[in-house]
Amino acid sequence: MSVVFVDGPVITKFVNDSGAFTEFVDEHFNKLDADGDGVLSLDELQKRFGRFSSRGFELQSQEEIGNLYNVLFEKFDADQNGTIDREEFRSLMKEIMVAKARGIGNSPVSIILQEDSLLMRAVQHKGPVGDDKN
Ligand SMILES: [Ca+2]
Ligand SMILES: [Ca+2]
């Protein structure tokens, strides 16, 4: 983990750079898609997504956690066909990132990041601190 400074525009810039953002989201999608059939099932979401989603929630019981996944899954599954495809995954990820950027605003905040988190990727995308010339 590292402590970094990030502000809303950094995140927005990353999300709007469709190449970098798509690459990042696809990478995550592939990790989640355990059986490699190109769509995510509720099962796959529970198994892998839980690793980072549960951290933000103070949930006690298994039932609460189960409910959270159901809500999450419904949110992702825009056409409600029971699976999450790449497009659905990408559009919700974008929504989440834009909301995060809006929440942070224009003043940089220091946050602790996991190496493989979305925000970390956004920060890395910006480049090392003080190396803005290239
Ligand atoms: Ca799958
Ligand atoms: Ca779907």
Image (cartoon, rainbow, N blue to C red):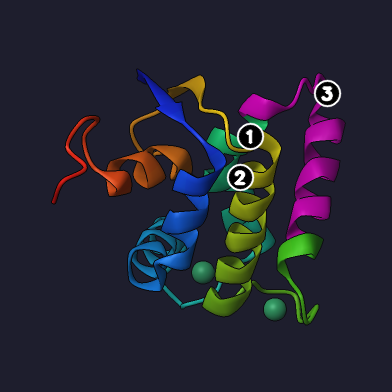
In the picture, the disc for residue 61 is 3
Q: Is mark 1 within 8 Å of ligand 2?
A: no
In the picture, the disc for residue 101 is 2
Q: Residues within 10 Å of mark 3 (few under 14, many from 20)?
A: few
Label 2 with label 1: CB-CB less than 8 Å: yes
**Residue 9 place in picture, x, y as percent:** 51, 47
The magenta segment is 55-73
Q: CA distance from mark 3 to mark 1?
A: 30 Å
Q: CA distance from mark 2 to mark 3?
A: 31 Å
**Taking the image as drawn, is residue 6 in sight?**
yes
| 62 drawn magenta | yes
Q: Residue at x 57, y 56 (%)?
A: 44
Q: Amino acid at mark 2?
A: Ala
Q: Name the foreground residue: 24 vs 8.
A: 8
- Write down the residue under mark 1: 104
From the viewer's perspective, is 57 left or right of 20? right
**Residue 86 place in picture, x, y as percent:** 52, 75
Q: Residue at x 46, y 40 (%)?
A: 119
